[in-house]
Amino acid sequence: MTALQEQFDATIGRGDRIEPRDWMPEGYRKTLVRQIAQHAHSEIIGMQPEGNWITRAPSLRRKAILLAKVQDEAGHGLYLYSACETLGVSRGELTEMLIEGRQKYSSIFNYPTLSYADVGTIGWLVDGAAICNQVPLCRTSFGPYGRAMIRICKEESFHQRQGFELLMTMMRGTDEQQAMVQESVDRFWWPSLMMFGPPDDESPNSAQSMAWGIKRNGNDELRQRFVDMTVPQAKALGVTLPDPDLVWNEARGAHDFGQPDWSEFTQVVKGNGPCNAQRIAHRRAAHEDGAWVREAATAFAASPLVEVRGASATNVPLVGVRGASATNVPLVGVRGASATNVPLVEVRGASATNVPLVEVRGASATSLETEGEN
Ligand code: BYC
């Protein structure tokens, strides 16, 4: 065993974190890329089923809440893609892998949202399952992933409550509204249980992922935790969970429950669920439609930092420097400059009392070209 491997094992053994600068076995890196990418893709694809109801939410308040939730999911995707990028793979590559079907996303988002009650059910059950699965991931062994999870879990908690509150409101409504909630729960219950992955004895990745501290619990343990958490909530709502085998087991101090249809799960994960093709087609179209934004952002990033026109000593525009803030004011808009490495800028007509603003084109730390001041 190499010294690096020993150091890695000792870090994991102590329950400390591995950071991107640390040496790590290739299998650990690959497993993390797989899981974090799948997680990021799930957040982004997961915007679609709920996004389907934004224009049809029944009031301004419900629309604002739903918009905010879907926007949070975009944010979660971005934190997770960023965490993944610390492992040496770019967001662009990950997106390509998703739309080419080389990486997965959570099975749950391949089911349609057929009624507005599904917005509440997704919040309650899907975000509820996500919380059970993700709270332990706040302690995952890879630093950037664990830190991203902390914020994500706080937001997921809010998402779950908003779903529960929506369903509670509908359950206090008309018979039709109550029936809508029950029908929605009937459709989403089993797919929610599948979110935790296959049973432990059919989970090829669990043992190694747990040994590495990537996963902290097995799939079955977290599924059980979710069922135990959800049963009293269902009672409070007044809905029935569609499982005839669901019963409290006094001896175990936990609920017994039936198994989801694992052949359906396999089909959905293989790409044959009700909405797989639609979800990926939509994601691909959004990616293609956004090409001009990426091109513009790339061109902007390559442009000089400062380009100020019409500026004078008394009329100093505040804009024009990216990343500047009240406490972080770059002295000169030259890339590659730092406190110790300040490129010389040639400014014509400058004196101590007359400091013209400088327009720098194509400037870099090694190649500087100055142009006339305004
Ligand atoms: N769906 O060996 P296993 C959200 C795959 S988004 C699809 O147990 P592992 C939200 C698994 O990848 C929340 N595939 O795997 C967003 C593996 O295949 P590969 C998403 C699944 O990784 C918007 C194979 O089956 N959460 O909350 O040890 C709106 C064997 O499985 C699924 C996460 O991503 C599935 N359900 O454990 C609202 C959590 N399950 O990769 C809400 C992070 C399994 O070998 N991920 N597979 O080809 C994890 O915790 C783990 O990856 C899993 C699976 C527990 C999901």
Image (cartoon, rainbow, N blue to C red):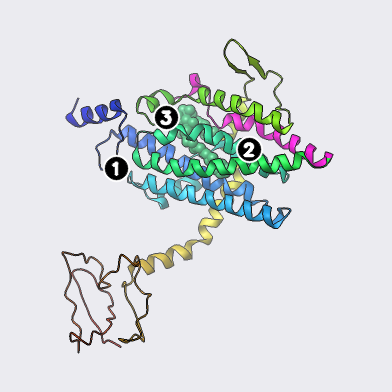
Q: Residue at x 39, y 42 (%)?
A: 147
* Marked residue nearer the N-terminal end (2 or 3): 2
Q: Residues within 10 Å of mark 3 (few under 14, many from 20)?
A: many
Location of residue 15 (image quadrant): top left
Secondary structure, mark 1, is loop
Q: Residue at x 73, y 44 (%)?
A: 115
Magenta part of the protein: which range?
175-204
Q: Is residue 251 visible?
A: yes
Residue 152 picture location, percent across and down: 48, 43
Foreground mark, 2 or 3? Answer: 2
Magenta run includes residue 104: no
Q: Is mark 2 within 8 Å of ligand 1?
A: no
Secondary structure, mark 2, is helix
Q: Amino acid at mark 1?
A: Pro
Residue 224 picture location, percent across and down: 56, 23
What numbered label is drawn on residue 124? 2
Q: Is residue 111 visible?
A: no
Secondary structure, mark 3, is loop
Magenta run includes residue 190: yes
* Marked residue nearer the N-terminal end (2 or 1): 1
Identify the image quadrant of the C terminus. Answer: bottom left
